[in-house]
Every structure is written in C-alpha cells, then in structure tokens.
Image: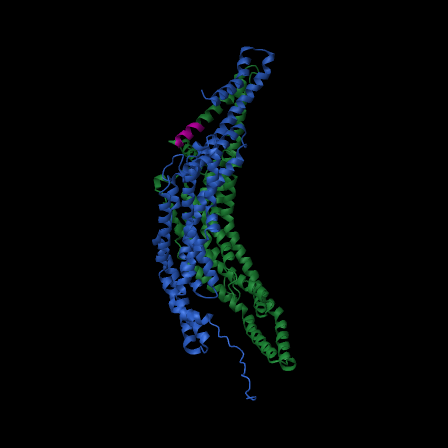
Chain colours: A blue, B green
Amino acid sequence: MDKHKIITVLVIAAFFMPIIYADDTAGEDSLEAKSFAKVLGEEAVKGISKGWMIWMCQDLYTFLSSITGHLREYIIANPPIDDLKGVQGFFIALMQPFFVLGIVLTSAYLLLYSESPRGRAKAKAVLVRLVYALVLVSLSPLIIMLLITFSSNLSGAIMDYTNVDSTSADSAGGIIEEGSGHMHHMFDVLTIIHRTGGVELLLLWETFLLIMNFVIAMRYLLVILWSIMFPVTLLLFSFTPTKSIGKKFLHQTFLWIFVQVGWAIAVLLIESSVRGMDIAMPGYPMAKIGLACLFLFLTTPRVVFGLMDWLSLGVEVVEIVNAAPLSMGALTMDEMKVEREVIVEEPALDNL
Amino acid sequence: MKENRIIILITAVALVCLACAPFAIAEADPLDPIAQAAEGAAEASAKYFIVAIPIRMWFQYEMMYPWMLSYGESFINNYKEAILANPSLLDSSAKGYNPGITNAVSYSISLMLPFYILAIVLTGAYIMFISGSIEGRVKAKNLLKRLVVSMIFFSMSPLILETMLVTSQSISSAIINQADPANVRMVLEGGIWGSYVIFCKLGVTDLEISIAYWTSLYVMAWLPYMVIGMRHIMMCLFCMVFPIGIALYSFVYMRDIGRKILEQTIVWIYLQAFLSMAILVISLGASYYYLLPADQNPKLTNAIMPLGSLGESLGMPSTGYQGSPAYVSLGPTSILSYAVGSMGYALLIAVPFMMLRLLNKFLP
C-alpha cells in the first residue's frame, strides 16, 4: 500500500479510537470521549462543506485550464477577414474626404501660390505621399489580410515542430497544466486542513489561468481594433504633422498581429527546454518548471513588445514606400542646402 | 449526468440532516457516542445547511440577481446614449446644454482679454516708439500678427469647441451605428453573466473564495460609466481652459503649456470616437465564440441550477421576494464567451488610456 494511504488510514483510525473505547467501557470516565464524538460529528459535516468547496473549485479549474488542451487553436486565432473588410470599407469611405481635401489643397498650392522652388518641392513631396497613402488605404484590407495570414501561418509552422496538439505530459499544454495543477492540488490539501487555508493559492492559480485566457481574448480584440483602424493609421502617417501618431499606430498594429508568433516561439521554447529535463535531472520539481512556463506564456506579449523591436521594420517598409522614386526629387530638394561663401575680392592690380 | 449527481448529493445531505434532527431536538444521551456524534453533526448541519447556505443563496438570488438585472445590465442597455452624450455650449435647446461650462469659457475669455489688449498695445508702442533695429521691428511685427490671429481664434473659442463637440459626436455616431447591437449585447452579457455564474457557483460554498468574481461584477457594471464620466469631467475642464490654452500657445515662452492644453482638449473630446470604436470591436469580437467547435467549448454551470430543477419538481414557487426568482436556472457560461466578454469591458476601460498615451505631441 502507498505510504500516504497508510498514514491516512492510521490518522482515521486514531480519530475513531476514542469512540471504540467509549463504546466498550460505559461509565463516567468515557464522558470526554463522548464530547469528542460530538466534535467528530461536527467535523464530518464541515468535511462535507469543504468537500463541496473543493468540488466546485475543481469544476472551475477544469473550466479555466481547458485552454491548455487547445493551445494551437487559441494561439493562431485571428478575426475573420470578411468581418473586418466591411468595417474597413466604412473607414476608407470616412477617410476619403480628408484625402481629397488634402490633394486638392496641395495641388492648388502648387498651381496657384507656390513661388519658391523649396516650397514647390515640399508640396510635391506631400502630394506624392498623399497619392501613395491613398493607394495604400485602398489596399488596406488586402494588406491586413496579408499580415494576418502571414502571422497565422508562421505561428502554425513554428508550432508544427512541437507537440502542442497532444495533451501528453511533455507537450506545452501538459507542462503548463502540471504547474497550475500543482497549485490546485495544494489548494485542495490546505482546504481539507482548514476551510480558508488555500484561498491564497486558489487566487493565484485562478489569476494565472484567467490572465492566460484573457490575454489571448484581448489580443483578438486588439487585432480587430488596429485592423479596422488601419486606413486611419495610414492617413495619419501620410501627413507630416500627424506622422508621429501614425507611426505609433502602425507599430501597435504590427506588434499585436505578430504577438501570436511570440506565443508560438514560447511553446517551442517550453517544449524543447523542458522535454527530457525529468530524465536529465531526476527528482527536480517539474511542477515549478511548469509554473515558470505558465508565467512565460503570460509575459510573452510584454517580451514581444520589449525585445522584438525588429517588427518596426514593417513601419520602415511603409516609410520606404512613401518615399518612393517619384518623390526623390522633392526629397533631394528638401535636403539640399546652397552654401554661398563670402566673396573675396581679388587684390587690386594697382602695383602692376 | 453530473447535475443528477449533484441533486442526489444534496438530497442525501438533506436526508442525513433530517435523520439527525431528532437527536438534536431531544437531549442526546451523554454516554452514547453515536448519539453525541449525531448531535454534533445535526448542530453543524443546522449552521451550515439551514443557516449559512440559505443566507448565501438569499444574498445571491434576492440581492444580487435584481442588482444584475438593473445595474449589471444598465450599461448594455444604455451604452449608445452614454457614449454619445456631450455637453452643448451654444445651443440652449440641446439636451446636453450646460450653461455652467459656457459661463466658465466666457469667464476665461474675459480673464485673458486684458492681457491681450496690453500685449497688443505694448507691441504697437514698441514698433512705433522704441524699436531701433530692423530685426527688432520684424520680430515685433510678427508678434503683433500672431497676437491678432490668436485673438480671433481666442474670441471664437466657444464656436471652435462646439464644432469639435459636434464633429466628434457625428463621427462617433457613424462608427457606433456600424456595430450590431445584438452582438454587443451577447458579448458584454457573456462577460458579466459569466462572472455572476462563477460567483454563484463558488459563493454558495463560501463567499470568500468568490470575492474575485463578485468584485469583477462591480468593475464591469460601473467602470465603463466611470470612464465615460471621467471623459465628461476632463472634457469640461479642458473646455473651460481652452481659451487660455489658445492664448498661451501664441506666446513663444508659454507655447509648451498652451500646446499641452490644446492637445488634451482635442484628445478628450475625440476620445468619444475611440469609445465608439471599442463598441464596434466588441461587436466584431462575437466571432471569438466560434474559435472552438461547440462540443469542445468548455462550459460551467451554476451549482444551484440543479436545485432549480429540484425546486420545480417539488412545486416550489418560481418567484420570490420582489419578483426575483426563488431559485435561478442560469444557463451555462462558456470559457470563450466569458473571456471575450470580460475583455470587452476591459477594452472599453483601456482604450481611452491607451489613446491618451499614444496621442500626444501632435501639434507643431
């Protein structure tokens, strides 16, 4: 028999000993045993209440930790492109008057008001940028579709090298489940000892698993937000005064779309680093490693935002497109400085 | 199957309690350990099953359920009106007309007007009498020009503010009308009722372990209103100081302060459009429900729901105090509806702050 089971049987037997003793020997001496029997009756009912509490929390745990069994579906989840297209069309229609106004005003300036070559060059640069932005805005549903599909496929391809689809103990889901399950088990044990003994642990695993569910849902909503705002982002990016805002928006769009790649890498990292650890280091508390993996998964968006600044390359690409050959002349003009040195008069030739 | 097991368990516990009751009522024999144990069990059962659980259930169903129907559903029923509400500065027949703000804006104008006059007079005097160098005169003339232009905008500030408020409302209205109200309701209800189901499930065994979900009910019901209210208050504040912002913006040394005031005014006014966009995102977020096939989408039922079925079979009245249900058969909540609904509320709360962080230093 298992060591723990023997201890449990002995403890239960020790509890029942006074009752057996009291039943055998009637008399004044057994009064203490009788009151103990009363306490035992009370504790039995309390045990039922604790058991009920554990049962309810077990249901909640199964509910919240279900994410670990569907990690691939959650990670590659993206909003349907067709839903986004309709709303993007609305924003494109909303932006068009601003573009038309911008182009008309700039053209009017070029035709009627501009006097200096510098002013004309600047106006031409603005006009070219506006035209490019207009083309990009019209293509924005396609660009978003491209980005989302690319990100989703890339994440899927990375996860193809993992065991994420199975629920085995060495899959990322299994490892995370082990970590949270360990806390849940500790909660059960502490609750049996005292009703509120495990509340802190309950809050901890609840928080971890809730955040895991929430952060994926939040990314989903933010991808929708930045995708439908993409035409606005491009508009802001194409005007010089609002360029910095447009840049920030563009950055956010790229980051939130590509967070799923970060998660896919996290899954790969978890599996490749943890697999075989129990063989290499027998006796190592794997549940703690599972907790660390859970924490890594939660912090992945932060890591993506902090470290993967290479995603801003996308922003640079848009900038490069904006500064395409047509506007090159204007840019050269803008950068050009005509430096005129002080005229030094030639010495008089009086002495000749 | 599981629900049947719960019914069987609750019935068994109730029967044990009933069986123990005679021992509790009659004086238990102090020498009989079985009677003593039964007495202890009966007392504890009375405390737990007859007092504590009914009190919790009463709290959950008699107090919190009507609260959910009124406060909990309030934002879902009124989000459009709440988000689109704006004060009106000039149109006294408008719903949101607030003479307090109009008076404050007028006061700001009257406060700054003497400074403008003084600055124009002094600059004029400088040009006419003092300036010696050409450079000085050019600078003074530029300043004078800027002062005059700024004074025109300054005097027109109520009109500018009203225009911004009206355009913000029109854009927001156009955006929010793109959202499907049925989807918005479904997603937001998924969040708040999901929390309520978990709160009831855990809370009936112990209120302490359900505190997180209980708190989240208040957060979801109140925080969106608080954010909208904060926008309203901040917007009123910046509307009041808007003329001062224009004035400061026209002076070189005060330009930074003026820029900040003007930027904040613009951002707080147009936050309305971003809140509308959050509603539109929530509406589109309904597609998250179909992330997993229906049979793989984990669901959680309320613990008392089977008791509702039991109540029905025992012929208990279906309504209790103030028309609230005596027992509630809440539908199950799914992890997807709960997660996306909760994040829908979080988005409504986070979007203004996110935009405030991103939208700065955009004025020259």
- Find residue B160 and report its horizontal and vertical position in percent: 51, 68
**Residue at horizontal 51 percent and vertical 57 percent from the top:** B356
**Residue at horizontal 39 percent and vertical 63 percent from the top:** A321
- A268 or B337, nearer to the observer: A268
- A6 or A17, nearer to the observer: A6
- Find residue B297 and report its horizontal and vertical position in percent: 37, 40
- Find residue B182 and report its horizontal and vertical position in percent: 39, 50
Q: What segment is highlighted magenta in the picture? A: B2-10
Look at the image and tell me whether residue A14 can be seen: yes
- Find residue A218 and report its horizontal and vertical position in percent: 44, 48
**Residue at horizontal 46 percent and vertical 61 percent from the top:** B169
- B118 or B236, nearer to the observer: B118
How many marks are shown on the rendered structure?
A: 0
Identity of the residue furthest to the front in this view:
A352
B98, above or below B33, in the image: below
Q: Main secondary structure of the magenta part?
A: helix
A337, above or below A168, in the image: below
Identity of the residue furthest to the right in this view:
B130
Rendered-image quadrant of the N terminus of chain B: top left
Residue A197 part of the magenta segment: no
**Residue at horizontal 34 percent and vertical 57 percent from the top:** A142
Look at the image and tell me whether residue B61 can be seen: no
